[in-house]
Amino acid sequence: MVELPGVQDTAEAKRIVGATANLEFRLEARPDAPASETETFPFRNNPQRTATLSRDVIITGDRVSSASQGFDQNGRPQVNINLDGTGGSLMNQATRTNIGRSMAVLYIEHKTDTRTVMKDGKPVVEHIPSTERSIISLATIQSALSNRFRITGLDSPTEARELALLLRSGSLAAPIYFVQESTIGPSLGAQNIQRGIFSVIVGGLLVVAFMLIRYKAFGVIANAALAVNLTLLIAIMSLLGATLTLPGIAGIVLTLGMAVDANVLIYERIREELRRKTPAQQAIHAGYGRAFTSIVDANLTTLLVAVVLFSIGTGPVKGFAVTLSIGILTSMFTGIMVSRALVNLSIGGKPLKKLWI
């Protein structure tokens, strides 16, 4: 099951998910090479143009360890490719003895077309596999190459991004057939968002009420820091371009409850100091200073769990882990730095006989 939150063009998404791409790195055939040892292919961006390549394959896309979109020094799109150790060795051996010859990058895309035929009076769907081969790059070898490559000659950044995506997916052992698909429309999506926002509001109000009842004036400071925390969390997710799903909203609700943990530890420490007859300003200083280690330890363990969830989880779990991780970082900042700044602005340096905490 594949979930694609935020995708608008479902037809394009299906085409990319269902495609299987691979590469072959081949040398351009010599003019005197026998016809049985050569093959002719069109260029991907210009089918009228062709080139004759050697049948011998240097390496295939199975040796590609990573692929990413980038731009060359002239601002034109390219794909940066890293090979594994074996692929790098084979490429170095082939190019070291063929400096001055041209090497082509042959793009191979396996597709599966479907058609409906009648058999015994019943419609039956048939899957017809097909393979398209085209050249996406043909460049002269200037020096011996290693395990890093740049594929140039692409038409647009979109093409470079799609090619990198297909190459990262690797060569699949079997084609993909779509058994069922569903799209959450605006009405259902809006309903989910409304319920998610309602849960955030209810959770936030409960936390705000508890802090006000439990810590009085300091509860107001904690709630102000909580509002800053929620603002930072949403701002960072917006900068990252994250799509807010239901698991992500659940992470926000959990963050609201965890965000005041740091304030609770600090305020309880201040209360302990006040019970020891420590002066108010010293009690505040001790509360923020001595609770710091406990706050870092508590949040660090939770952050480690979120990292594990993101590394081994699926789509919805990863969405929850991302929101939780960002929320932990922002809550530590607001719980320690922002709340301390608000305390200093309101009562810092003032002679106090009693703290409303």
Image (cartoon, helix red, strand yellow):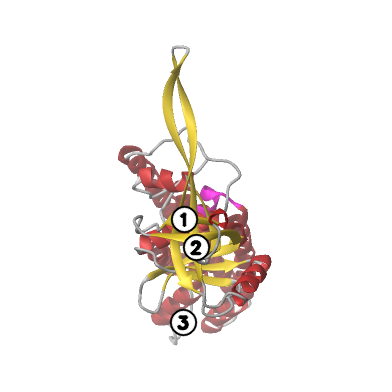
Say if 40 sits above or below 352 in the image: above
Nearer-the-camera pick, 326 or 312: 312
Nearer-the-camera pick, 61 or 99: 99
3 or 1: mark nearer the eye = 1
Label 2 element class: strand
Label 1 element class: strand
Which residue is painted at 37% across and 47% down in the image?
A: 12
1 or 2: mark nearer the eye = 1
Question: Neighbour class for label 1 at 10 Å: few (<14), some, many (≥20)?
Answer: some
Question: Neighbour class for label 3 at 10 Å: few (<14), some, many (≥20)?
Answer: few
Q: Which residue is mark 1?
A: 40
2 or 3: mark nearer the eye = 2
Numbered circle sitting on residue 105: 2
Question: Neighbour class for label 2 at 10 Å: few (<14), some, many (≥20)?
Answer: many
Which residue is painted at 58% across and 62% down in the image?
A: 64
Q: Earlier in the sequence, mark 1 or mark 2?
A: 1
Magenta extent: 313-319
Numbered circle sitting on residue 352: 3
Q: Position of residue 260 (x, y in %)?
A: 51, 63
Nearer-the-camera pick, 57 or 31: 31
Residue 229 visible here: yes
- The image quarter in which residue 122 lies: top left
Q: Amino acid at mark 3?
A: Leu
Q: Amino acid at mark 1?
A: Thr
Q: CA distance from mark 1 to mark 2?
A: 13 Å
Residue 195 relative to residue 304: left or right: left
Q: Position of residue 94 (x, y in %)?
A: 62, 70
